[in-house]
Image: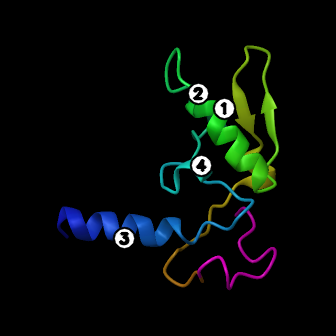
């Protein structure tokens, strides 16, 4: 698999992430968070974490602020971790609850 094929497959799989769900280490960017549920700060003086928070909240994902100011998402509630993405349908075709956290 060359780089172009790899990127195409990553984007295909990312399109399967239902609105209102998150996963880690994939794209679209606002639906991807760290494995602990944390939203990355993107470094001092940037607003990427806040923009991601706003994008997620617009999709119905609750983002909490921790004691240290970190932004977190409850993966038990909003996580999307299918056993396989081979047979998953694009989000427009998903039934509610069809891709609940595994």
Q: Residues within 10 Å of mark 2 (few under 14, many from 20)?
A: few
Q: Secondary structure at mark 3?
A: helix
| Position of 38 relative to 22 (above/below) | above
Q: Main secondary structure of the magenta part?
A: loop
Q: In 3D space, how far apart are the residues under numbered discs 2 and 4 (Cα atoms)?
A: 13 Å
Q: Residues within 10 Å of mark 3 (few under 14, many from 20)?
A: few
Q: Which residue is mark 2?
A: 47
Q: Are marks 4 and 3 in contact (CB under 8 Å)?
A: no
Find residue 9 and name its label: 3
Find residue 12 and name its label: none
Q: Which residue is mark 1?
A: 50
Left or right: residue 88 versus residue 20 is left
Question: Could you tell me which residue is drawn at 48 percent across and 80 percent down?
Answer: 86
Q: Position of residue 49 (x, y in %)?
A: 61, 32
Q: Is residue 13 magenta?
A: no
Q: Residues within 10 Å of mark 4 (few under 14, many from 20)?
A: many
Q: In 3D space, how far apart are the residues under numbered discs 3 and 2 (Cα atoms)?
A: 29 Å
Q: Are marks 2 and 1 in contact (CB under 8 Å)?
A: yes
| Position of 40 relative to 43 (above/below) | below
| Position of 89 relative to 61 (above/below) | below
The image quadrant where one finds the C terminus is bottom right
Question: Could you tell me which residue is drawn at 59 percent across and 43 percent down?
Answer: 33
Q: In 3D space, how far apart are the residues under numbered discs 2 and 1 (Cα atoms)?
A: 5 Å
Find residue 30 and name its label: 4
Of badges 3 and 1, nearer the viewer stands: 1
Of badges 4 and 3, nearer the viewer stands: 4
Q: Secondary structure at mark 2?
A: loop
Of badges 2 and 4, nearer the viewer stands: 2
Q: Is residue 92 magenta?
A: yes
Range drawn in magenta: 90-102
């Amino acid at each position: 698999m060359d780089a172009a094929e790899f990127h195409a497959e990553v984007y295909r799989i990312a399109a399967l992430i239902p609105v209102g769900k998150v996963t880690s280490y994939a794209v679209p960017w606002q639906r991807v968070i760290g494995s602990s549920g944390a939203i990355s700060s993107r470094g001092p003086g940037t607003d990427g974490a806040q923009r991601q928070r706003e994008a997620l909240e617009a999709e119905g994902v609750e983002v909490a602020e921790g004691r240290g100011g970190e932004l977190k998402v409850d993966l038990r509630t909003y996580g999307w971790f299918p056993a396989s993405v081979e047979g998953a349908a694009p989000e427009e075709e998903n039934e509610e609850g069809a891709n609940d956290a595994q």
